[in-house]
Amino acid sequence: MLGRLIARIQENTADVRSRPVTIVAFGDSVTMGCMAAGEFDFEHVYHARFRRLLEQRFKGTVFNVINSGVDGDTAAGALSRLERDVLRYSPDVVVVSFG
């Protein structure tokens, strides 16, 4: 998996016309950005921080991070939305987080 990510980063850096490096964050309320009951923070959620770190490390690479978190979802429940919320984007990396 890491090899694919590195290859996509190199491809995107070398050719600005290539599609962005796509990362899907798939999970529950934490992935969605819920930091406390009724409080959402989309700037400090883990995948937004991850994106900023990647952008700092790999300047010139375009990253597309898709937030597929759903409040109250479970790993078992998420199977029904796998195609719609993850696979249709043909991601290079999927980060999965369910509590």
Image (spheres, grey):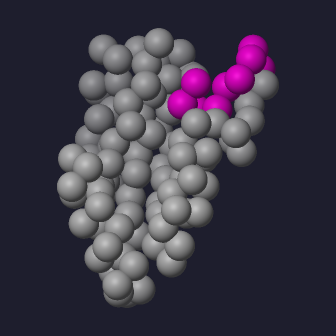
Left-right relation of 72 to 77: right
Taking the spot 74% from the left edge, 35% from the top edge, the residue there is 41
Q: Between residue 44 and residue 54, name the one nearer to us.
A: 54
Counting from the top left corner in percent of width and height, residue 2 is at 26, 49
Q: Between residue 39 and residue 48, name the one nearer to us.
A: 48
Counting from the top left corner in percent of width and height, residue 31 is at 54, 31
Taking the spot 32% from the left edge, 73% from the top edge, the residue there is 10
Taking the spot 51% from the left edge, 57% from the top edge, the residue there is 54
- Give the mark count: 0
Left-right relation of 11 to 95: left
Outermost residue, right direction? Answer: 39
Residue 36 in sight here: yes
Segment colored magenta: 30-38
Is-magenta flag for residue 79?
Answer: no
Q: Between residue 79 and residue 40, name the one nearer to us.
A: 40
Depicted 97 relative to depicted 18: above or below? above
Taking the spot 33% from the left edge, 33% from the top edge, the residue there is 81
Counting from the top left corner in percent of width and height, residue 35 is at 71, 23
Counting from the top left corner in percent of width and height, residue 67 is at 51, 43
Residue 90 in sight here: no
Depicted 60 relative to depicted 6: above or below? below
Can you tell which quarter of the image residue 13 is in? bottom left
